[in-house]
Image (cartoon, helix red, strand yellow):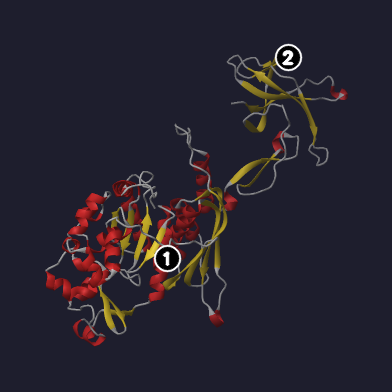
Amino acid sequence: MQAPEQNHEQQQEQQGVVEPAVGQAAGQATEPAAQPGYVILEKDRVNLADPVARAAGVRPGMKRGGVLTLAPEVRLLERDPAREDAALRETGIALMRFSPDVALLDEATVLVEVGASLRLFGGLLALCRQAKSMLATLGFTARVSAAPTGQGAWLLARYGAGRRARRVLKLGTLERALASLPLFAVPEAQPFEDWFTGLGCTTIADLRRLPRAGLQRRCGEHLLDSLDRAFGNAPEIFDWLELPPSFAARIELPDRIEHAEGALFVAHRLIVQLCGWLCAKQLATTGITLLLEHERGRQAIEPTPLVIALGEATWRDTHLLRLVREQLARIELGAPMIALRLEASRVQPAAPVSDSLFTEPGGSPEDHARLIELLVARLGPDNVLRAVPDADHRPEVANRWLPVGSTTKAAALPPGLPRPVWLLAKPLQLLMRQDRPFYGSMLKIVSPGERIEAGWFDGQLVTRDYFVAQANDQSCYWIYFERVSSRDADSPSRCFLHGLFG
């Protein structure tokens, strides 16, 4: 919407640069049009036919009997408006990853306001390629167009000849592109077909050359309003798609599937919808639940849950799909699947993208978290472990291994005391020369002593004095001397190497 004080020329220029929209005019959503041997019927008449059926002579409006006579091998399907509406809504939610402003229009059309998103997604052509790729993931084909106005984008998607002619950014280019379209591309002009034919009008350019006052008296104001909106001379008002506060989506499978991996395509469709919902809400998820539904009714079986917990919140479909793929590969189904349901069990506000100029060496914390999540999904939660300090002063038993996703609190390390990175599995006894430990060279004590006496409670008593020792090459080692009792005062003190510092 433009500011009231702007004149008409300023308004046109700003709309051309700032407010382009992408419109998609797709075929019926009941079945992809690319599948051969299908005919869609509505009220026992052909509504849509695929290329194989058309090659056999099937045409829109033909009755069922005529279709069976010309092409008895094709599959006849009844049009399902409810499924088409659901598919259109799913498509709109998925496209919200490009913009939160999405409108669902007639004739299987989705309108997306992408004026503020062009630079983010690499320009108009890159954005259109990503949109078509996403629609292919959902199982649909589409004609993608772009124009400074929503009505203009819809007309180009329906009737534009050539990919380049369907994607324009400026109002001047749009005016030339729309002028050559057939007159009856405008729905409001179709009831007056005979009258316009008698006047010799065949294109939108011919229609616009007619006197406006006469057109309004003859055809009403709706025709002129439609043209003004298409050419950017009148404001457009859309009912933007509203999203629910929580995400849950379900898709029925076309047939019973006995292997979990066979549901990956449908799971991908659900994940794409989830990521569109997350982007529109500016949220990220830390946990999703995929329910594999089985038989219902008298022989009902409880759904098989597939719970995925994430260490780092994400809104990217590629990472979620990899985790789901790994989980599905490890599941053995007890019964065939008939449907899939995806729920976002935990969400939180999305963190802003890092504004660091240089990439972090070794990857960012998010990269590390994604790697851990992938390993957990592939190997199982009990096979990816992390070291956790334990409440024991003896170094060899002061550590335990827990699953990486465990929430068990670790014991606090002794403050201010040196601990080596590498602890030997078994202490190595060192030679003593001139009452000094020897390991490649004479070792020099460079730290105060740390006395450890523990283990009397489990019969593994140790009495040691630990030091940091330094060799001639400046390498540092963690050594200890065994403490001897007064009764063994004549016995020589033994020294052991227990750890190495990095």
- What count of labels does the image hold? 2
**Closer-to-camera residue (313/120):** 120
Point out residue 67 in the picture as x, y percentages from the top left corner: 23, 83
Q: Which residue is mark 2?
A: 435
Q: Is residue 481 above or below residue 297?
A: above
Inspect the image, locate mark 2, and give the three-letter code of the amino acid beneath it.
Asp
Q: Which residue is mark 1?
A: 89
Q: Is residue 323 above or below residue 465?
A: below
Gap between marks 1 and 2, in whole Å?
A: 82 Å
Label 1 Cα neighbours within 10 Å, binned few <14 / some 14-19 / many ≥20: some
Left/right placement of residue 287 relative to residue 54 reads right
SS at circle 1: helix
The residue positioned 28% from the left and 57% from the top of the image is: 145
SS at circle 2: loop
Label 2 Cα neighbours within 10 Å, binned few <14 / some 14-19 / many ≥20: few
Point out residue 16 in the picture as x, y percentages from the top left corner: 30, 49
The residue positioned 25% from the left and 59% from the top of the image is: 156
- The quadrant of the picture occupied by the C terminus is top right
**Closer-to-camera residue (338/174):** 174
Disc nearer the start of the sequence (1/2): 1
**Closer-to-camera residue (390/69):** 69
Left/right placement of residue 493 relative to residue 328 reads right
Q: Can residue 37 be seen in the rendering of this structure? A: no
| Quadrant of the image occupied by residue 492 | top right
